[in-house]
Amino acid sequence: MLAAAIGHHVAQRKTEATQLYRQILALDPGHPQALLGLGLLLGDASADHAALSEAASLLERYLVLHPQDAQTCCSLGLFRQREGNDAEAAKWFELSANGAPDLMHAWLGLGVSWHQLGQLGRASDALERAVALASGDPIVANNLGDLRFTQGRFEEAVSAFDHALTIAPDYAVVHCNRGIALTRLKRFEDAVTSLLQAVALNPDHIEAQLTLAEAFDHLGQPVDAARHRREVMLRQKPVVERSFTGKPEARILVIGGGARSDVPIKFLLPRSRFDLIHVFAVGDDEREPPLAADLPEYDIVFNAIADPDNGAFYLGPAAKFCRGLPKKILNPPERVQPLVREIMPQLLADIPGLALPRTERLSRSDLLAGKPAFDLPFLIRPIGSHAGHGLERIDDASMLATYLAAQRAEDYYLTDYHDYASHDGLFRKYRLIFVDRQVYAYHLAIMDHWMIHYWRADMEAAAWMKQEEADFLADYRSVFSGVLGDAVREIARRVDLDYAGLDCGLTRDGRVLFFEANANMWVHLNDTEAAYPYKHRYVPRIFDAMADMVARNLTQA
């Protein structure tokens, strides 16, 4: 019977092979060859969640009997990865790589899972090992490029994508990835060349079409930008990502725009809990039937377009699209759209305990004409920039001239600078998250420089810094008590979004120093539990609050 099952398996007669493997296991539940054969057969590329889960279980039973089988460990890692369980996948890939150090697919899988888990250094080591074992594999090179992009090493990302394209010049995904990386380097003409190649190879590549539109915007070619946004509306189909469990708590329609305008939802709306249906609202829908009529069944809508500057092209069409939907809309586009930096001092005026720096929007020509009308020092940044890119403190006129000579943007935000160093001489930036207008602590960054971002801060440098962050995460009121707590809760009420956040500091005279408040606040749990056990204790409260909010709103059509 086993020989017949293997014969059917080799000949790709899946039904016959499956029946025979099951018959063998009915007679002998621990039969190793049947466990392995049926597991590999059920876990093929077309497997749904139920089949993948059974396949993984079968391989785990087999590995109890043959724990040194590196190839099967690698297959099990792949199945867990496809289920979305990267932590479990990494465990099996690591066992596989340890048992067979020259097994490239083990290192590739390990690198991909560690990348997904935010372990970027470990991912880099694994992918570099995979490249060394298979320098002629374009998939490996593309994954290395993806990682370098996540690390912000955009030049190296482009080099990795170039290497992939020397091996597989018709690889549309890599042309798109290369184009996106080039936009981060502000090499928009080169980006357009790569992205046009991507859509020539695959006209339905929505991400390439969207990024082309953004690149043409930067090049001052609005007609070309509009053409590619129209292509998105005409070509796109709803993309469905099923829950990893197969038993979703809700089916969420996620409305997106361009990648730079959307809040990442991997942790906020995890596929461990929800089915996600993705659409892009980027212009008038000229299709027949229109996109809204072509949607699969869904329970609730989440507008992921979160940046009122980078998302300006998308929020209007998204609002129009949402008006035709019968379900509850979380973060309605019309409430996201007004939250640009320069209106926040008016929106949040007169909140006791809040220091609100003046912010204005000025053009390059205004600045060159000497119209900042700001006392020195002041902060300047290109409109739409984040994470400190292009942010500088201007102390005198010569600094402004040097800054503008180095920048290409046409419009900028200017903000009064407030010295917010604490009494120990260090600067502290707090991030608070608002879920359904309730306040949750997310992180605290401590540095010796005023321009502070969490990724810049070395929070592992001293145990006392991590303890201070842990105390903040345990209860935000340990820092924001009394009038300060009232201030951040009032900000949450006035921002009036289902999901948003606040970045702020504290002035020496004991007020909340406002930095920004909007829906474009990235929340994740990529830090290891070993290094940051308190994050794994407290940050999930935000994700649970999101799930609870979804559940409460399911019946509100």
Image: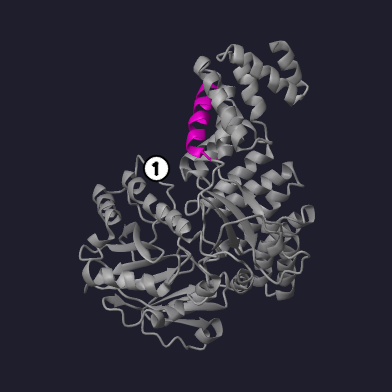
**Residue 431 seen in the figure:** no
Residue at 33 percent of width and 73 percent of height: 490
**Quadrant of the image for the C terminus?**
bottom right
Residue 528 counted in the magenta span: no
Residue 98 location (% of width, % of height) = 50, 24
Position of residue 111 relative to residue 157, above or below, is above
Type of colouring? one colour
Residue 171 percent location from the top left of the image: 73, 47
Q: Residue at x 78, y 52 (%)?
A: 201
Where is residue 352 drawn, in percent x and y?
A: 27, 78
Q: Is residue 214 above or below residue 95?
A: below
Q: Give the crowd class for mark 1: few <14, some 14-19, many >=20 residues within 10 Å.
A: few
In which quadrant of the rendered view does residue 4 lie? top right
Q: Considering only vertical position in the picture, is 516 above or below 69?
A: below
Instruction: Please indicate whether residue 113 sits to the left or right of residue 22 in the image.
Output: left
Q: Residue at x 51, y 72 (%)?
A: 336
Please, what is the dominant secondary structure of the magenta stretch? helix
Residue type, label 1: Thr
Q: Is residue 15 visible?
A: yes
Magenta region: which residues? 84-100
Q: Position of residue 58 (x, y in %)?
A: 57, 23
Residue sitting nearer the eye, 3 or 78: 3
Camera-side residue: 357 or 539?
A: 539
User: What residue is disc 1 on?
Assistant: 528
Residue 219 located left or right of residue 354: right
Q: Is residue 546 above or below residue 271?
A: below
Q: Is residue 86 magenta?
A: yes
| Residue ID at (66%, 57%) | 207
Say what secondary structure mark 1 lies in: loop
Task: Judge by depth and name the residue closer to the eye, 437 or 103.
Answer: 437
Left or right of residue 234: residue 335? left
Q: Nearer the viewer, residue 112 or 285?
A: 285
